[in-house]
Image (cartoon, rainbow, N blue to C red):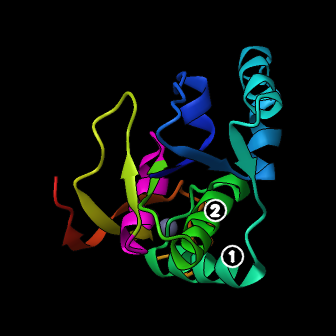
Amino acid sequence: MIYVLDATAFIFGFIPSKNFQLYTTEEIIKEIQRNKLSKLKIDTLISQGLIKIISPPNYYEIKVEEKVSLLSESKLSKADKSILALSLFLKDTQKEKITIITDDYSLQNVASALGLEFKSLTVKGITKSIEWIIYCPACGRIAENVKENFCLICGHRMKRKPKKVLHHIKA
Ligand SMILES: [Zn+2]
């Protein structure tokens, strides 16, 4: 069993065991080292050789970017995307089952659309995969760029709503 850990997994105190291998990326390490407590945790894991830090090949980053833009999922950080790319890479190269540990709904959303499994630590995981529409509640305009925060026509703050449910995830 392989667990790929995102930042929330460290912050909420994921407990390692010898029964599974832990992986994460350089971007996640950078993100969590900003917090003193989780920095201590991660430094211990690294020094004990309990976690592998891998940068996924560019090919997998591109696959993730494609899915992210298809879903209009704009709330993912570079670190979040690196976790998805790493998981795809491991899925292709390792024989064991890959599970992402994350409490981030946006990350879970893209993970499920990519056919990756995930587990939540503190929150109830999402039960369906969502494709978002970014729209203006005032004039009704639909944004083409998911990063658009304010309407280009009338200046209102943009909102998002599900466009369609892609598929339901088995509990
Ligand atoms: Zn508008």
Residue 171: image location, x then y, percent: 16, 52
Residue at horizontal 81 percent and vertical 26 percent from the top? 43
Q: Quadrant of residue 40?
A: top right
Q: Quadrant of residue 38?
A: top right
102 or 18: which is nearer to us? 18
Residue at horizontal 83 percent and vertical 29 percent from the top? 47
Q: Which residues are magenta?
A: 101-115
Q: Quadrant of residue 44?
A: top right
Element at badge 1? helix
Instruction: Answer few, some or many: residues within 10 Å of disc 2's Cα (few below 14, many 20 plus, some between 14 and 19).
Output: many
Q: Is residue 123 above or below residue 89?
A: above
Q: Amino acid at mark 2?
A: Lys
**Which residue has dot 1 on it?**
61
Element at badge 2? helix
Q: Main secondary structure of the magenta part?
A: helix
Nearest to N terminus: mark 2 or mark 1? 1
Residue at horizontal 56 percent and vertical 66 percent from the top? 154
Residue 134: image location, x then y, percent: 45, 68
- Disc number at residue 82? none
116 or 93: which is nearer to us? 93
Can residue 107 be found in the magenta stretch?
A: yes
Q: Amino acid at mark 1?
A: Glu
Residue at horizontal 60 percent and vertical 25 percent from the top? 11
- Is residue 61 left or right of 47 when viewed as pictured? left
Residue 137 in view, yes or no: no
Q: CA distance from mark 2 to mark 1?
A: 7 Å
Can residue 38 be found in the magenta stretch?
A: no
Residue 120: image location, x then y, percent: 38, 39
**Which residue has dot 2 on it?**
81
Q: Is residue 160 above or below residue 1?
A: below
Residue positioned most to the top:
37
